[in-house]
Amino acid sequence: MPRRLRFPTLLRTVAAFLAALTLAVAIGDSPQPVSAAGQPLRYNGGAVGSLDPARIGDASDVQLTLQLYAGLTRLDEAGDPYPSLASSWSVSSDGLTYTFHLRSGLRFSDGSVLDAGDVRRSWLRLLDPQVHASAPDVLNVIVGAADRIAGRAGEGAVGITAPDSRTLIVKLRHRAGYFPAITATPATFVVPRSARPTGTWQAAGSFVGSGPYMAAESSTDKLVLRANPNYVAGAPPIAEVDWITTLPSDEVTAFSQNQVDLTGIGGSDATWVAYDPGLGRALHRAAALSVQYLGFDTKKPPFDDARVRRAFALALDRPRLVELADGPAAVPATSVVPPAIQPPGIPKGASSDVTAARRLLDEAGYRDRSTLGTITVNATGLDVTAIAATWRSALGVTVNVESMTFEDYIGRLDAGQVPQVFTINWVADYPSPFALYDLLLTPAAHSNYGRWNDPRFEMLLEAAAAASTDAAQASAYAAVEKEVEGQAPIIPWSYGDSNLLVRPGLRGLGALTVGLLDFGLASWDS
């Protein structure tokens, strides 16, 4: 999960959602929590960026939002949506209208009533151009949503209505069988009526939310979350979660010294931890639905020419270079869609071909490479040393590598000040290949930083979204991927994974969906 899917190193590393990949913490068969125990759960969550679902900026924000708010649905251990605030939903015969039926007696954490009007208001707030939300595109499939985000339409043009307090009706632009998974995206979760356009209206101690926990206290090194007695599923078994924002040491040391109960660790640490007699049993791995990629500014020369973009892509031997940059455990990317949600038969990407790359540059009018000018590559989100060296040696081009703080970098991207070649990491907002293609590459998407506009791609993507059988969907997405590969608006680079150290006795985290942990389902062994 939204920009929400980015990290400086892994993706302002969200980011967004994923498929079911086994995290072998003991689990039950249902999304309901098991028995309670008194001790707090100490989680190394990192810096708190925002308490507002509309202001999600990275993976940490997504994780936190999942604890503080609720939506119509949530994702279970298999990555499938199950009813949360909604008790059920139905779909019209043409697949374009979803009717959600909300549970009775819903309340926010302060006891105030939560109804269908609050869901509609929260979604319209996300789409409001005055709010400047970080991930409004997640609702683009709704009629009028894209026009509302762009300021071309008012709220009345958006296909979201609440005819009564327990009914929400949503009109879609095209069929989208994955829509209930979109409503499990934290950016769409329900905020109280006190929500304001700015991101500073919520604070620990006076927090009002709809999720399993409330932000109760904040200090320099942690945010204390306390169980919400008004949560739709009931107060969670673990009464307190200490969201650790700073550690006195590295993650492995902090876990070893019993300073945290749950923490992510880097892939390089996981490599040796797996063989450690003590720590190895606490290590749990899952493939995250994230992709790291390079993008081109497709509106300006030379990368407004698909032949040039294709040449720069073909020059890179990704399997070799990814290992050089990220180590032997890194997984080279063959598509913008991570393996866990790739449709069967999707093309696996072309092999490097330096001869073809040089020929394409010649055909594009750059036989004299100096006419390309200096190619600027931003390295804020990725080690591009080997990439730049390859382009210099294989293509004979001049490359300048720039870097800056991650905040400044994201600010530039958001303002449309796009480097010729940019790097970023993204996590799928929901478990469908449409999530990546739509949010990163369609013209209306805020996160289409390269400003690529390909009507044929849009047509193919809508056909894939509307496909009603597995075979038709696989064929349609294969055509989408072929178009992306041929036009090369981006270069998929590598796929991420998730490595966690989990304290013995912590139960209920189950199989990682979207790489996120729902603490409302967790408990300690009695």
Image (cartoon, grey):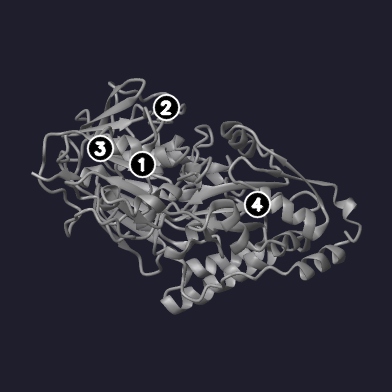
Q: Is residue 143 above or below residue 196?
A: below
The residue that disc 4 covers is 295
Looking at the image, residue 111 sits to the left or right of residue 467; the answer is: left
Spatial CA distance of label 2 from label 1 is 22 Å
Looking at the image, residue 276 sits to the left or right of residue 348; the answer is: left
In the rendered image, residue 444, in percent from the top left (x then y), is placed at: 59, 50
Looking at the image, residue 34 sits to the left or right of residue 56; the answer is: left
Mark 2 vs 1, N-terminal side: 1
The residue that disc 2 covers is 196
Is there a contact, CB below 8 Å, between mark 2 and mark 1?
Answer: no
The residue that disc 3 covers is 114
The residue that disc 1 covers is 63
Spatial CA distance of label 1 from label 4 is 26 Å
Spatial CA distance of label 2 from label 4 is 34 Å
Q: Quarter holding the C terminus?
A: top left
Mark 3 vs 4, N-terminal side: 3
